[in-house]
């Protein structure tokens, strides 16, 4: 019996270590591919060369002609240059077996789409590209002014969907705020309910302003190997409700080995401003938002909730995937909530990673106007409720200044109420002129916004579908780059956004 118990303990301890190791190796491969991308984009032969093994051979077949290059010959073709503004790169897929791996990547320029297949190996110096084959496909030539976004309904009958996460090009997980966690097959138009959701879920009553229910669903960067998914939702006890963050293994169509990562205590009776947005950074850390929970500023304590580092509400957090706290998090003091990354948040929901600059952007709900777009910075205080670009619900609210505090102003705020939700940085060829533009869903104006950014400065915003407005909760792309969005309706829809000009 002792031998059996020992064997079980060793097996149980082996699984997380294996999953963590697979995640680490994937990150190392992504790093070497990004080094190749960076060198290719600027003609930096040091970076490209460092990513490739000395024996690397490169092959191309184009227009009936087969060409093969040695590593040195290939590097001799590069000349230093500035990174093109319309260049985008994308890691499509990675597969790892022991010290060998393969990857499919794309590099999109103004004229062409390059698709490369890498074979990689892990040497004493780390992962390197052992060889590659590539192909080039010219983009269709069209005037960017002829871009014509069109909607195509793929699925409907969803109960106020909140989030979606692709697990393949054909299958996507969708969380319904007032319904279930679903696995949807987009080809067969089939949906399967995921069983095993925590029983402390507080369902939405469906009334105006009621934010209660299921929120974000997010897959782990190493999902293919570990099957981890992350969920945020409104949890309840006799004391009230709050935001809870959990991790689970998706085993077939059920949640197993659920682990609670964060509970935004205290439980209160408000049914608003839970936050619940989540994203993984390139550092492999989990970032998530927790709302302030108050509806009216008159209920603020002397030290406002979002300014109190000992209160879990009104903040953005950064943790490891297992719930532990990274050692390099910013320091807010001995009594600060563990995992705290930024303060002064009212009701942030949308998070998006701008991969090239390696920056996380987030949306913030105001009261009367005051809707914002911000870049997430370690230790930053975004001002609520001390500062706002809108108006307070309680007109005479006047918070007392907090000595020593400095506040980070938003990069952008609308003059009208937009109620921004999910964010996404577009990359792809279908809307080539939109590359690196930020797409923002809106609940109030009920539309899709395109935000043009240059060097962390918002140059312009464009509201799309102005003649066909509907509340938009989420915007994202499939693994193949197709653009999708979710509508926040009783009869919610998954919509594909297509370019009708092509």
Image (spheres, grey):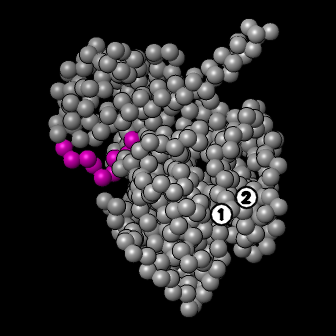
> Residue visible at 40% across and 17% down?
121
Q: CA distance from mark 2 to mark 1?
A: 7 Å
Q: Which residue is mark 1?
A: 274
Q: Secondary structure at mark 2?
A: strand
Please tell me how many numbered marks the rendered image carries: 2
Image location (x, y in percent) of residue 344: 49, 68
> Residue visible at 30% across and 52% down?
85
- Give left or right: position of 316 versus 179: left
> Residue visible at 78% across and 58% down?
236
Q: Which residue is mark 2?
A: 234
Other residues around mark 2 within 10 Å, as few (<14) / some (14–19) / many (≥20): many
Extreme residue toward the front, this view: 334
Residue 277 lies within the magenta run: no
Figure check: 232 above or below 368: above
Can residue 201 be seen here? The reply is: yes
Q: Tell me the magenta residue range.
A: 81-89
Can residue 58 be seen here? The reply is: no
User: Marks 2 and 1: CB-CB under 8 Å?
Assistant: yes
């Amino acid at each position: 019996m002792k031998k059996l118990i020992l064997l079980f303990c060793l097996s149980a301890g082996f699984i997380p270590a294996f999953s963590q190791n697979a995640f680490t190796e994937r990150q190392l491969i992504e790093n070497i591919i990004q080094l190749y991308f960076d060198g290719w984009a600027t003609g930096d032969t040091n970076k490209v060369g460092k990513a490739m093994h000395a024996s690397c051979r490169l092959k191309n077949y184009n227009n009936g002609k087969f060409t093969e290059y040695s590593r040195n010959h290939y590097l001799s073709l590069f000349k230093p240059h500035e990174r093109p503004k319309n260049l985008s790169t994308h890691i499509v897929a990675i597969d790892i077996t022991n010290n060998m791996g393969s990857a499919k990547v794309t590099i999109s320029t103004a004229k062409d789409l390059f698709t490369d297949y890498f074979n990689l190996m892990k040497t004493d110096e780390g992962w390197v590209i052992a060889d590659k084959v590539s192909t080039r496909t010219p983009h269709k030539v069209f005037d960017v002014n002829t871009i014509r976004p069109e909607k195509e309904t793929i699925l409907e009958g969803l109960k106020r969907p909140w989030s979606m996460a692709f697990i393949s090009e054909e299958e996507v997980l969708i969380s319904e705020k007032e319904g279930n966690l679903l696995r949807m097959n987009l080809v067969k138009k089939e949906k399967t309910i995921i069983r095993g959701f925590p029983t402390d879920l507080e369902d939405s009553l469906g009334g105006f302003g009621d934010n209660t229910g299921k929120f974000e669903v997010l897959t782990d960067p190493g999902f293919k190997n570990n099957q981890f998914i992350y969920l945020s939702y409104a949890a309840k006890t006799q004391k009230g409700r709050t935001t809870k963050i959990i991790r689970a293994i998706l085993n077939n169509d059920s949640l197993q080995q659920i682990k609670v990562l964060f509970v935004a205590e205290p439980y209160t009776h408000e049914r608003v401003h839970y936050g619940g947005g989540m994203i993984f950074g390139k550092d492999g850390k989990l970032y998530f938002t927790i709302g302030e929970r108050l509806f009216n500023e008159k209920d603020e304590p002397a030290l406002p909730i979002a300014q109190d580092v000992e209160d879990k509400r009104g903040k953005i957090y950064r943790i490891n995937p297992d719930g532990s706290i990274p050692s390099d998090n910013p320091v807010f003091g001995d009594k600060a909530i563990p995992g705290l990354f930024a303060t002064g948040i009212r009701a942030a929901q949308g998070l998006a990673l701008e991969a090239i600059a390696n920056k996380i952007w987030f949306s913030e709900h105001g009261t009367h106007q005051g809707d914002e777009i911000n870049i997430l910075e370690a230790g930053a205080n975004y001002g609520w409720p001390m500062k706002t670009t809108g108006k307070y619900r309680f007109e005479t609210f006047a918070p007392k200044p907090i000595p020593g505090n400095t506040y980070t102003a938003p990069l952008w705020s609308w003059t009208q109420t937009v109620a921004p939700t999910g964010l996404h940085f577009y990359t792809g060829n279908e809307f080539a002129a939109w590359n690196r533009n930020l797409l923002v869903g809106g609940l109030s104006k009920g539309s899709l916004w395109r935000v043009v950014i240059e060097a962390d400065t918002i140059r312009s915003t464009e509201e799309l579908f102005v003649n066909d407005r509907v509340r938009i909760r989420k915007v994202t792309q499939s693994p193949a780059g197709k653009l999708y969005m979710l509508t926040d309706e009783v009869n919610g829809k998954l919509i594909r956004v297509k370019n009708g000009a092509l």
